[in-house]
Every structure is written in structure tokens, then in C-alpha cells.
Image (cartoon, rainbow, N blue to C red):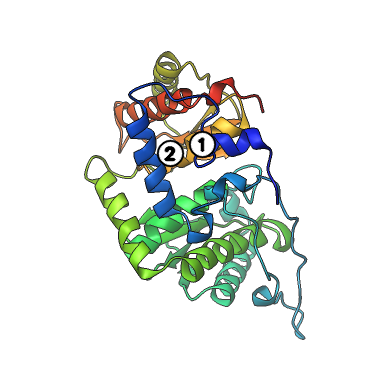
Amino acid sequence: MMFPQILRRTLGLGGPATEPVTGEQPELNALDAKLKIVLPPEYEAGYEDVEPVSMGSAALKYDPAGRVAWGEIWESFCDLAMAGGPPHKGKLLEPATDSEIAADPDRYRTVIDEICRGIRMVSDLAVEPSPNPGWVRVHCATQVMAQWLVRAIVMENVSVRMQDVVLELPAGPQFRIEKEIKNVITVIAKTSHYFDGHIEYGQEKKILAIFEGAASKSRLLQPAQTRPDPTWRAAVAARLSDATGLQAGGADYTGWLGLDAKSVHSAIWMMRALVVSNVLARREDTLLYVPLNPSIDPDGNILVSAVSTVHRLAAARGLFDVQS
């Protein structure tokens, strides 16, 4: 796939849209080096060519018993959203609420069983129902795998949360097999394929060093699982606007704040820069979504500092002069 030259320039290796501001270049170089380590090797010399356009959805296949043959559906995957490819979901897939689960517990158990069956078929990961309603629990083999997958999955616009080497993915009685169930199974198939099949052990050690270095400064900022106080949320949004000029917007998701990044190009660039800076991030079109978590970041300083730094570097690259 070929990619518009203007977007190649904004993604990191094809040259900036304008000359970076003097003094910003060392930070930009360091960020670019981290991205090249974190991404699978096939993107190292060419992720500026990645196009955020979907290949289309793979059709379901069925076994003789009429069950979905999850392990036989995919021969290839779209580029990772982490590399600038299209997110698997256009809008965030969230877990069911307690009331939704209580209203249809039998269907909820059926959905959980099918998601677990599918994940076992498309990966080597152990999976089980979570004791937390609305989630399935996936056990990663290593800390670096969990750290990498949580970042890669959230950028695909599927809810995910991490504790040590355990990930939790969303489920709910309203999930349909050809839609939400498939979404969850696909995102594990896609991200684990890239991690297990493309990233070698030596690179894993370098990736872990980047994540641990970021964690030494602050904990991984994940979205809160309950809706933050509206006054606190508004105050953080105002601080971000004052610091960056980016205005809040988009859907009101639990634990997420949307910021208008002005273009797809700048949203992609800032999203990836935040993720290697230990702040989960994702995008929906030109909206950059950043995590709100008063428990981890009670005064909002971690988020405001990270977004301000990334915005400054994006501006130095001239990204806000580029039209989507």
C-alpha cells in the first residue's frame, strides 16, 4: 500500500512536515528510537508508509457442528493501529454494566464461554471468566507481553485493563457473535500474532526496558473503571486546553477524555507518543482519547504533563499545520 506523502512525513521516519524547532530534535529523536523498538521489525524502516485504511472484515467460518471455527478465519491482519493502521473498532467497545448482566445472566454466560473458546483457538493464551462482571481474563506469558498487548489492544479501540501479567477484555449479554464477540477475539488474534510471530526475544528485552523506564517515573495511566466526578473531569479538560489549545470533545466514555487533535495525522502521532510515555491512548478519527483516573493521577498532573510534552513535540514537527 502506498501512502500520501504528507502523512509519511508526519509519522516519524519520512521527515517532518516542517523543520523541528531548534532544541526539540533530541527529544524527537529519542521518541522515534523508542517507537522503532516497540513496533514489530517490519515497521522499523517503513511505518511511515502505513495507511489507516481497513482491509475489510473477514467472514466467519463454521465447523461441522455449526460453531464458529475461529482459528480458520484469518490469513492476514490489517496493520497495527500502533503502527498507524486503522483501529479495529471505529468506536470503543466497552464491557456490559452490572444491570445489563443481571437482566440476562444466561446469555452473558453464553457470550463469556464463546469468547473464551475463541481466544483459546486463536492464541496460546490461557483465558477464563473474570470474577469481575463484564470481563474475561487472559493470562499473558510474560510481563513484557502484557505491557505490550495492553497498549496495542487499547489502540484498536477495544477496552482492556492490565494487572501484572493478566489482561481483562470486555463482554456482555448484548454481544453478538458476528460483531462484538468477533471484535474481542479478532483483537487478541491480531495483537498476539504480531507479538508472538514478529517480535524476537532480544527486542522484547529492549521493549521491557522502555516500559520499565517509563514506569520508574509514574505508573501506567489506565482509564478509571468508574466514571470520574464531572467537576474533576472538567477541571482536567480545562487544564489540558490551557496547556495545549486542544478542546475536549467526542463521546463521553467512562474513564476517557476526547481531545480534538485537528487531523488524523496528529491524532495518530500523539497517540503513539503517549503510549511509549506510559499513558494509554487511542483515537477515533481526529479525536485523541486520553485516560482519566483519579486513583492513579488524583491531581491530573501525570496526564497534563504527558499530553503537554507530546503536543509540544507534535507542534515542533509541524503536525498542526497539516490538514486531514
Q: Which residue is mark 2?
A: 273
Q: Quadrant of residue 178?
A: bottom right
Q: How many marks?
A: 2
Q: Residues within 10 Å of mark 2 (few under 14, many from 20)?
A: many
What residue occupies the far bottom of the structure in this picture? 64
Q: Quadrant of residue 237?
A: top left
Q: Which residue is mark 1?
A: 269
- Residue 145 visible in this rendered orientation of the protein: yes
Q: Are marks 2 and 1 in contact (CB under 8 Å)?
A: yes
Position in image of residue 203 (x %, y %): 37, 62
Q: Amino acid at mark 2?
A: Ala
Q: From the viewer's side, name the closer residue of 147 and 33.
A: 33
| Image side of residue 89 versus residue 223, left or right | right
Q: Amino acid at mark 1?
A: Trp
Position in image of residue 227 (x %, y %): 46, 35
- Give the residue displayed 48% in from the left and 24% down from the top: 19
| Vertical position of residue 319 compared to residue 170: above or below | above
Q: In terms of secondary structure, where does tag 1 sit?
A: helix
Position in image of residue 146 (x %, y %): 39, 60
| Vertical position of residue 5 compared to residue 145: above or below | above
| Vertical position of residue 64 compared to residue 38: above or below | below
